[in-house]
Image (cartoon, rainbow, N blue to C red):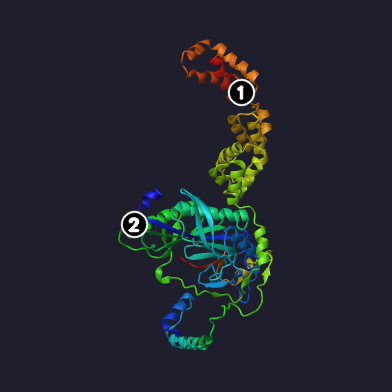
Amino acid sequence: MVAQMIEGWNLVIGIEIHAQVSSKSKLFSSSPTDFGSKPNSQVSLIDAAMPGMLPVINKFCIEQAVKSGIGLNAKINKKSIFDRKNYFYQDLPQGYQISQYKDPIVGEGFVEIETENGQKKIGVERLHLEQDAGKSLHDQDPNFTFVDLNRSGIALMEIVSKPDMNSPEEAVEYVRKVRSILRYLGTCDGNMEQGSLRADVNVSVNKPGNELGTRCEIKNLNSFKFIHAAIVYEAKRQIKLIEQGDSVNQETRLFNTQSGETRSMRSKEDAHDYRYFPDPDLLPLTLDDDWIKGLQDSIPELPDQIKERLINEYSLSSYDANIIVSDKATSEYFEDVVNNRNPKLVTTWVTGELFSILNKKNLIIEDSPITSKKLGELVDNIENGKISNRQAKEVLEEMCESGKGALEIIDEKGLSQISDEKEIESLVDNVLNSNPENVKKYKNGKDKLFGFFVGEAMKLSKGKANPKIVNDLIKKKLSQ
Amino acid sequence: MEFDKKSLLKLGKLARISISDDKLNSLSKDLNSILEFVDQLKEIKTNQVDPTSNSLNQKLEVRDDKVITKNNAEDILENAPEKEMDFFVVPKVIE
């Protein structure tokens, strides 16, 4: 659909991700950062910008920014500077945001994403530390806006991409990948619903070979679905304008999640003039080589590396490996289960059956009622032939409901599969002997009756016979 | 650098400070004399010097990631001209 819409047009997309540092306290004050607290209950005199208050930087936040930079294959700048970005808004008590302008803590890097046409490298321009603003509520009163400063001063990492993405799908993949890297590193929890990770998306369109079009920025998108929808809408809007002979205004736009449309947020004459200058309250931030080296050594295995290892160690397909490493909890779960078991079987049961149950229950894997140990037990019973795949699905559902172990359920329900050939042979003989007519017909060419014999034998075993052995034996007997 | 009335009005607007017409002349005169004074710095050759963002020869002080501030809502809201349900209340802002 998207490809059709933009036929004959190039789409150019750059993204700014705001990722909240997973710190207990704020960037420049010792206030807590808990989500969903009472309004203005996490505000220090610094966050409220009382006169005479001085910011003191949180060491942990510096570390997380550098770790994230390493995870994004980026240059770590040994000297960076905090600047004041000046603007007037009711949720910014200081009248300026402390941010980093010309000298960010992290410079150029890249991430690799999977696209329809294989791997693609997306450039990262920079990562810098800055303060979050407070929250304005416009819908509480017809005449007033309500302000909660709990978020004010929380540490954000702003990650700016190069304009390297050319489709909504690539944009979504990029955000997914950055989020996944940050979650593996533990530098940001990536919770988009709670606003821990938001994206501002810059979109422009042009005809191939022509110079770049004018871009619009769509602010504050907090789900993959919205990122995709906002880009599609915005690209269509711009193409329509140009095809009508109008031009695109460079502006900031908001995405309406209800209508799926974007609308202009700030008019042109109000164009912001941030008058950046170095914050006189803060000295330049300098990092030494040994300290950076120490952090480099502490970086855990990241999704790209784990993916490669899964492919090599367990012969997983690139597709399966990608699904497994997309989330840290999933890859840990998978590796717990796969240990000494059949990787193919484990992949099916984790990414297929378990995921579908979790989806149905709207659960994430961290909250799975079926632990990796319990799923392992189930897989063991499939592998040793005690239960069939079909029975295993039943057991898995029961495990999810009751929290009981696989073996317990198998015993309780008397599910265990009959794999004893002698026992099955007597079942098969029984079926063939009591249906001589059908055996005759089959031997005269009515192949379809094969299924009938299998069905009867299974029925006779109350569904417990190993279907493969039943099949093999019937085939053998009928060809005699 | 010359600070004209137009820049002065723009600056006032950005800072949300209204400047009355009768103040325009005297204010821009004052600001211009400050800028002229600072302009003397241009006489120094600095093309061999790294930009200085701070004149102190010290390292940035850091602190541990510890929560010390407790719920201050009452104190924080005490100075607010308007408040309701622990929120600051300001004139409607529409974007």
Kindly tell me whether residue A366 is visible in this rendering: no
Disc 2 residue type? Lys
What is the chain identity of the residue bearing mark 2?
A: A
Kindly tell me whether residue A249 is visible in this rendering: yes
Q: Residue at x 65, y 78 (%)?
A: B57
- Vertical side of A129 occupied by B1: above or below: below
**Residue that badge 2 annotates:** A240
Q: Residue at x 57, y 49 (%)?
A: A326
The answer for how far apart the CA atoms under marks 1 and 2 are is 64 Å
Mark 1 or 2, nearer chain start: 2
- Viewer-nearest residue: A279 or A38: A279
Q: Does A295 sit left or right of A96 as displayed?
A: right
Whole-percent x and y of residue A327? 58, 49
Whole-percent x and y of residue A223? 51, 53
The C terminus of chain B: image quadrant: bottom left
Whole-percent x and y of residue B38? 52, 86
Disc 1 residue type? Ala
User: In which quarter of the view is residue A385 placed?
Assistant: top right
Whole-percent x and y of residue A6? 37, 53
> What count of labels does the image hold?
2
**Residue that badge 1 annotates:** A465
Secondary structure found at label 2: helix
